[in-house]
Image (cartoon, rainbow, N blue to C red):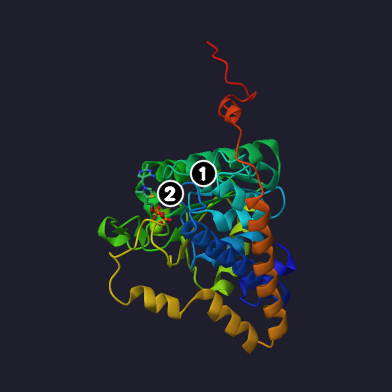
Amino acid sequence: MTQTDVELRRGSAPDGIRVRLYGEMVRMRVFEQRVQTLFLQNELNGPAHLSTGQEAIAAAFGLALAPGDLSLSTYRSHAQILARGVPMGPVFAELMGRDGLLGGKGGSMHLTSTEHGHLGAYAIVGAHLPIAVGTAWASQVRGVPAVTTCFFGDGATNIGAFHEAVNLAAVWRAPVVFVCENNLYMEYTRTEAVTAVTHPAADRAAAYGLEGRLVDGNDPDAMLSAAFGAVADARRGDGPVVLEAMTYRHSGHAQADPAKYRPEGELESYLAADPIAVYRARLLEDGVASDLLDDLDAAAAAEADAGVRWAADRPLPAGSALETNVWADGGSAWRS
Ligand SMILES: Cc1ncc(C[n+]2csc(CCOP(=O)(O)OP(=O)(O)O)c2C)c(N)n1
Ligand SMILES: [Mg+2]
């Protein structure tokens, strides 16, 4: 364990890393605000699921993961892909169905950049958990010190794949961090209405001989400690980590959802405790210069503006693109 890890575990991260965390959260928020604007301008191709309010989780792991580490996530993954260092322009272009990160063929729900270690966003709930165990196991077998981080929602914990994946990871002591983003809802259903335990990931970890970890995912400092701690433990070879981060999505499930099923006042109470606003105030209180934070706000806005401009100039995919990426060698010819 490095000195930094020890400091983070005590909840006293150096201000440099806390300021970077703030900057990353702002980048994610601004990106998704632009996505919402593009949707209203009818520029989006396909649905997009926003994670406004949940940014601290992806941002903290983005800082905790090293180059060469792997990550997998769900259809709600704009923040996760930015956290791995993928530039905004190709992601905007992908969402617009233009020649972007995946040539316009994947869209918001399948964001992937193997070059940055992000092995995909998955639209089938729970499908990527066993895959994450496989990539972690591959690192273990090859003797590569890479950690796999697997993000999923509370809903995925009621799917068999969650249990199969955590069990096998525990048996193999695979270097994987399972991160449950518990935002209280699975699509339009409140989690507690269909879930037998209070903390669907952390409470169930014990069934596989693991100690479930619970963190306030709306507290960026707590997330920083939890993320660095989990990644360090998995890398050391202590086996898998199950971390449940309590959070809240400010938006509906996707654009078409006005989220009328939420009790009156709930959204307002979470907006009043917006993690980005709360963190900004905390950093200022701790003596961080406001100019520094203003500069990060401005840099994020400029990056998003440039990214949207770049994306809008990208061509639409050619019709012939339909026949590419069908097989591993790129062709689509029938073979028996
Ligand atoms: C196997 C499967 N069942 C159902 C769906 C439909 N569906 C899409 S998102 C979703 C809710 C998932 O909730 P959660 O895991 O909490 O993630 P969140 O959307 O809150 O991030 C459901 C049921 C699906 N995509 N895959
Ligand atoms: Mg959920």
Residue 8, percent from left and from top = 65, 71
Label 1 residue near ligand 1, CB within 8 Å: no
Residue 270, percent from left and from top = 41, 75
Residue 328 vs 234, above or below: the answer is above
Residue that numbered label 2 is attached to: 208
First of labels 2, 1 by sequence position: 1
**Residue under the point 51% across and 62% down:** 37
- Specify the label residue 169 is tagged with: 1
Alpha-carbon distance for marks 2 and 1? 9 Å
Task: State the SS at label 2.
Answer: helix
**Residue under the point 54% across and 41% down:** 106
**Residue under the point 63% across and 52% down:** 312
Name the amino acid type tagged 2: Tyr
Quick one: label 2, few (<14), some, or many (20+) residues within 10 Å?
A: some
Question: Horizontally, is 102 left or right of 288 in the view?
Answer: left
Q: Are marks 2 and 1 in contact (CB under 8 Å)?
A: yes
Question: Horizontally, is 295 left or right of 312 in the view?
Answer: right
Q: Nearer the viewer, residue 314 or 36?
A: 314
State which quadrant residue 191 falls in. Answer: bottom left
Question: Horizontally, is 194 left or right of 140 in the view?
Answer: left
Residue 195, percent from left and from top = 29, 56
- Specify the label residue 250 is tagged with: none
Name the amino acid type tagged 1: Ala
Task: State the SS at label 1.
Answer: helix
Label 2 residue near ligand 1, CB within 8 Å: no
Residue 31, percent from left and from top = 58, 62
Residue depth check, mark 2 versus mark 1: number of the one nearer the observer: 1
Q: Nearer the viewer, residue 251 or 62?
A: 251
Q: Is residue 288 visible?
A: no
Residue 143 vs 236, above or below: the answer is above
